Image: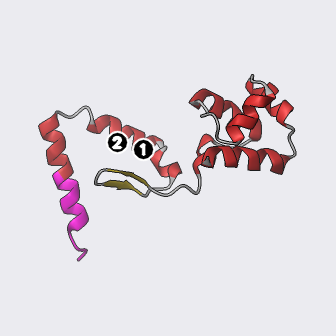
Amino acid sequence: MHVGARLRRRRELLGIKIQKLADSAGVCFQQIQKYEAAQNRISPERLYRFARALGVPVAWFFDGLPPITTGKLQVTLPRHELESRETASLVEAYYRIAPEGRRAVHRLIKAIIETPPD
């Protein structure tokens, strides 16, 4: 619902007709109506095409959503930080470490976070 509403808002802000957006994304105008009304989900590829046509990054469609919560983990970083090369590189390196090493790294990071500054 959120992504569809953002799609409509941006399209209307730019004054783009549904048919023009549909043509640029390779779908019929009825499909755009369904996306905007949240009747159909938008695939990542299609969302990328919409972002290019509307001149926004893909992450723009998710702005304003509450923090992502999965179990005990709550991600509150801004989207641009979650998508940075540094973050991607760090995550990639982390998963190259053997599981017992990852647990040790996790404990170390938690200890650093919980240590009060001098």
Residue 99 versus residue 109 in the image, above or below: above
Name the quarter where the C terminus is drawn.
Answer: bottom left
Q: Residue 90: which disc? A: 2
Q: Residues within 10 Å of mark 2 (few under 14, many from 20)?
A: few
Quarter of image, res 53:
top right
Determine if the magenta segment contains residue 112.
yes
Quarter of image, res 47:
top right
The x, y position of residue 13, in whole percent, is: 82, 51
* Mark 2 secondary-structure assignment: helix
Residue 27 versus residue 55 in the image, above or below: above
Which residue is located at x 58 percent, y 57 percent?
A: 64
Determine if the magenta segment contains residue 73.
no
Residues marked 1 and 2 touching at CB (< 8 Å): yes
Query: For this view, does 112 lie left or right of residue 70?
Result: left
As rendered, which of 72 and 104 lies closer to the eye? 72
Residue 43 versus residue 73 in the image, above or below: above
- Give the magenta range: 107-118
Residue 69 versus residue 55 in the image, above or below: below
Q: Residue 86: which disc? A: 1
The x, y position of residue 49, in whole percent, is: 69, 30
Q: Main secondary structure of the magenta part?
A: helix
Q: What amino acid does circle 1 point to?
A: Glu
Which residue is located at x 36 percent, y 56 percent?
A: 74
Which residue is located at x 61 percent, y 27 percent?
A: 45
Q: What amino acid does circle 2 point to?
A: Leu
Q: How many marks?
A: 2
